[in-house]
Image (cartoon, helix red, strand yellow):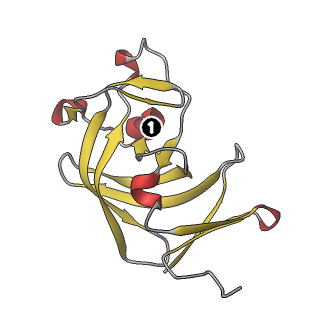
């Protein structure tokens, strides 16, 4: 399977996916930054707001995490399904964090996009083609004999 991504308007490598989660009911398209430095995947505040995430149905993670502009206890979504353009069902991620709503972070938005981290990316090889403005994620063996 080869998935095509792009560079976001802010210049980071990204891929669009439709996500679904049944408890609570969350679905919709999200642009995820591909972050090979993050150990986990995160739904950012802006995307959580667009999806109208009802935080009262979510549990908080037991431990504090620190990543980019956030340090604290995120909420947790379980069994999040990812669908990609041109493919049917593609992948389920057992756990994805959700940044707390602005009212829990001093009524300010955390300047951070939604992220796909190692928990997702470790199943793929990704190729950055900046000159062509595209990203390729694949689960195929692309290494050639040297």
Judged from this view, the residue extending furthest toward the top is: 106
Q: Is residue 130 above or below residue 76?
A: below
Residue 132 position in % (x across, y down): 79, 68
Quadrant of the frame with the C terminus: bottom right
- Total label count? 1
Residue 73 or 17: which is nearer the viewer? 73
Label 1 crowd (10 A; few <14 / some 14-19 / many >=20): many
The residue at 35%/37% (across/down) is 98
Q: Is any atom of residue 29 visible in this view? A: no
Judged from this view, the residue extending furthest toward the front is: 146
Residue 83 or 63: which is nearer the viewer? 63
Residue 47 position in % (x across, y down): 44, 41
Residue 5 position in % (x across, y down): 61, 64
The residue at 37%/77% (across/down) is 88
Q: Is residue 6 above or below residue 97?
A: below
Q: Secondary structure at mark 1?
A: loop
Q: Is any atom of residue 14 visible in this view? A: yes
Circle 1 sits on which residue?
44
């Amino acid at each position: 399977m080869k998935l095509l991504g792009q560079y976001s308007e802010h210049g980071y490598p990204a891929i669009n996916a439709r996500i679904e989660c049944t408890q609570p009911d969350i679905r919709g398209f999200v642009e995820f930054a591909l972050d090979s430095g993050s150990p986990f995947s995160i739904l950012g505040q802006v995307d959580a707001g667009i999806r109208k995430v009802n935080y009262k149905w979510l549990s908080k993670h037991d431990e504090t995490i620190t990543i980019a502009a956030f340090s604290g206890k995120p909420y947790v979504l379980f069994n999040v399904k990812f669908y990609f353009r041109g493919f049917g069902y593609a992948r389920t991620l057992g756990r994805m964090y959700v940044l707390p709503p602005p009212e829990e972070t001093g009524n300010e938005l955390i300047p951070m996009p939604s992220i796909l981290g190692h928990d997702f990316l470790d199943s793929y090889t990704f190729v950055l083609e900046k000159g062509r403005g595209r990203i390729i994620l694949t689960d195929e063996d692309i290494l050639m004999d040297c």
